[in-house]
Image (cartoon, grey):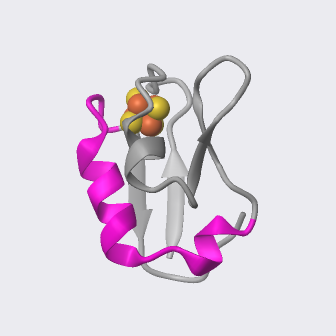
């Protein structure tokens, strides 16, 4: 699974972190970032839910090996 966060679009609402805390975290400025290694262990349904929860559609999910 590949997960991309558009850092120009993210507004730091934190919904992704609440939905999938093992995958997403918030940086010092409150914007979303990927948890190191989280992509490998992420549950696809949880990641999809996190992407859908984002109010500005800043998260893109695709099949394939993680590249983070
Ligand atoms: S849910 Fe979207 S806007 Fe909110 S922190 Fe996550 S990526 Fe950013």
Q: Is residue 4 magenta?
A: no
Residue at left offset 40%, top offset 62%: 61
Q: Is residue 45 left or right of residue 63?
A: left
Q: Quadrant of residue 11?
A: top left
Q: Is residue 36 above or below residue 57?
A: below
Percent of width and height locating residue 67: 69, 69
Percent of width and height locating residue 20: 45, 56
Give the number of callouts: 0
Residue at left offset 24%, top offset 49%: 52
Residue at left offset 44%, top offset 31%: 14
* Figure quadrant of the C terminus: bottom right
Percent of width and height locating residue 13: 41, 24
Q: Quadrant of residue 31?
A: top right
Percent of width and height locating residue 38: 64, 67
Stretch in magenta = 37-57
Q: Is residue 56 above or below residue 41?
A: above
Q: Is residue 14 above or below residue 18?
A: above
Residue at left offset 52%, top offset 44%: 5
Quadrant hosting ligand 1: top left
Q: Main secondary structure of the magenta part?
A: helix
Looking at the image, which is closer to me, 27 or 10? 27
Q: Is residue 39 magenta?
A: yes
Q: Is residue 60 above or below residue 39?
A: above
Q: Is residue 27 left or right of residue 14?
A: right
């Amino acid at each position: 699974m590949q997960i991309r966060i558009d850092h120009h679009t993210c507004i730091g609402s934190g919904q992704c972190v609440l939905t999938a805390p093992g995958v997403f975290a918030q940086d010092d400025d409150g914007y979303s970032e990927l948890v190191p290694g989280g992509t490998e262990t992420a549950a696809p349904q949880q990641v999809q839910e996190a992407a859908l929860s984002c109010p500005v559609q800043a998260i893109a999910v695709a099949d394939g090996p993680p590249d983070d």
